[in-house]
Image: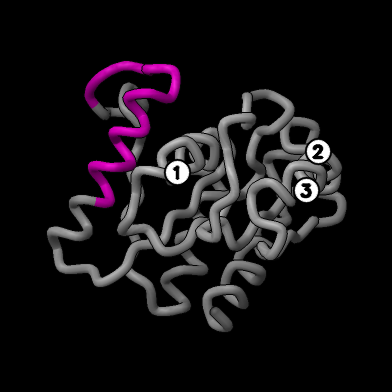
Amino acid sequence: MQNNVVESLVKACKKAGYATLRFNFRGVGRSEGQYDEGVGEQADVRGAVAYLKDLGMASVDLAGYSFGAWVNARAIGDLNDVVRMIMVSPPVNFMDFSFLQYTPKIQLIIAGSRDDIAPPDMIQKMLPGWNKDSAFHIIQGADHFYGDETGKIEAIVGDFLKTS
């Protein structure tokens, strides 16, 4: 939850006037529980969405990076209150995304041109099955960890939030 990519997502959302909630999945940092191969982590996402709805949020968007993008994608079918989803570096070369069917909720995907965990060419092939109308941005020169390229993530997400 405290890495450069997640921080860039939070900054973009805050600059666009969005309230944010970020959390560690079970077993990470000081959170309770233990890693559950994506099953329990989906419950973590559902719990976060329910919490936001209980606070009176009219709509909820999800944004996830790497493993978080995979967990959000696994949970999205059960989350009627989620309007949109942003995926940064969905780990298509490392985790199975064959479960993911078309959903208009996937609206923005970002990957680095040198990302071997989320190769843009693999994502491009999967994109028509996810949502052919979603925006797909490739950050040239960036690998999976984005290094000094997180400002580009902030700009892409900021522009997306302003125009959608």
Numbered badge on residue 122: 2
Q: Which residues are magenta?
A: 32-49
Q: Nearer the viewer, residue 106 or 117?
A: 106
Amino acid under disc 3: Gly
Mark in front: 3 vs 1 = 3
21 is higher (above) or lower (below) than 118: below
Helix, strand or loop status at disc 2 = helix
Helix, strand or loop status at disc 1 = loop
Helix, strand or loop status at disc 3 = strand
Image quarter for residue 163? bottom right
Mark found first going from the N terminus, 1 or 2? 1
Q: Is residue 8 visible?
A: no
| Spatial CA span between label 3 and label 2 | 12 Å
Residue holding disc 1: 2
Query: In this image, 102 relative to 10: left or right?
Result: right
Residue holding disc 3: 112
Residue 139 x, y percent position in the rendering: 79, 57
21 is higher (above) or lower (below) than 31: below
Which residue lies at the image location 65% right of the left edge and 56% below the top edge?
131
Which residue lies at the image location 69% right of the left edge and 65% below the top edge?
133
